Image (cartoon, rainbow, N blue to C red):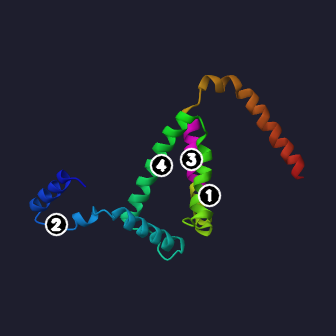
């Protein structure tokens, strides 16, 4: 870190009566390596279901990495024209079976919640993009299709 940052840390330490005494240790050169090791150990504990909630630094680190990858991925895919789903599929294979960060048993337990959340978001977005005039023009076709689908399914199930 640069000299200005550490001088600001010293200023804060003197102002708050040394309540920030561990701040220099956080910004050592091997901070990222140690954080990555802690992250892997915490993910291993979480995937083993021994602990329900991760610690705050792990959650914030994961959220920061996710946001950074999302912004960087969006910029990359805008420039290249490659669909972003390809990146997400490769990332899923890497963090799942290849590195073993995410355990399939743990994921299968929380998939219904994320599926419900995804459905809520999709329906909300669809509702925001509705055109009432277009709905009024095509409502009779939708009604006929719904009635025919209901009648056909009743005959098939009998």
Please give the residue where the numbered disc 2 appears in the rendered image.
19
- Taking the spot 50% from the left edge, 72% from the top edge, the residue there is 44
What is the x, y in percent for residue 92? 59, 56
Asked if marks 3 and 1 touch (Cβ < 8 Å), the reply is no
**Is tag 3's residue or tag 2's residue first in the polypeptide sequence?**
2
Observer able to see residue 155 = yes
Q: Which residue is denoted by mark 3 in the rendering?
A: 120
Labels 1 and 4 touching (C-beta < 8 A): no
Disc number for residue 93: 1
Among numbered discs 3 and 4, the one appearing first in the sequence: 4
Q: Nearer the viewer, mark 4 or mark 2?
A: 4
- The correct choice, above or below, for 111 with respect to 133 in the image is below
- The mark nearer the N terminus, 1 or 4, is 4
Neighbours of disc 4 within 10 Å: few (<14), some (14-19), many (20+): few
Is 77 above or below relative to 36?
above
- In percent of the image, x 70 and y 28: which residue is there? 139
Mark 3 vs mark 4: give the one in front.
4
Decide which of tag 4 and tag 2 comes sooner along the chain.
Answer: 2
Closest to the observer: 144 or 123? 123
Q: Are marks 2 and 1 in contact (CB under 8 Å)?
A: no
- What's the CA distance linking mark 1 and mark 4? 16 Å
- The x, y position of residue 72, in whole percent, is 47, 43
Q: Locate residue 47, reporting x and y percent.
A: 53, 71
Q: Residue 130: x and y, percent? A: 59, 30
Q: Which residues are magenta?
A: 115-127
Q: Residues within 10 Å of mark 3 (few under 14, many from 20)?
A: few
Q: Nearer the viewer, mark 3 or mark 2?
A: 2
First along the sequence among labels 2 and 1: 2
Label 3 sits on a secondary structure element that is helix
Question: Circle 4 sits on which residue?
Answer: 69
User: Label 4's element?
Assistant: helix
């Amino acid at each position: 870190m640069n000299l200005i940052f550490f001088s600001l840390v010293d200023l804060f330490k003197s102002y708050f009566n040394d309540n920030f005494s561990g701040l220099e240790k956080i910004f050592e050169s091997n901070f990222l390596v140690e954080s990555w090791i802690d992250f892997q150990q915490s993910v291993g504990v979480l995937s083993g279901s021994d602990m329900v909630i991760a610690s705050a630094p792990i959650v914030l680190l994961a959220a920061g990495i996710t946001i950074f990858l999302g912004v960087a991925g969006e910029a990359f895919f805008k420039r290249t024209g490659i669909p972003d789903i390809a990146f997400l599929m490769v990332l899923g294979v890497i963090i799942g079976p290849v590195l073993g960060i995410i355990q399939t048993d743990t994921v299968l337990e929380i998939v219904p919640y994320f599926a419900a959340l995804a459905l809520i978001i999709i329906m909300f977005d669809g509702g925001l993009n509705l055109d009432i005039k277009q709905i009024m023009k095509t409502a009779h076709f939708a009604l006929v299709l719904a009635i025919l689908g209901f009648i056909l399914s009743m005959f098939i199930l009998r």
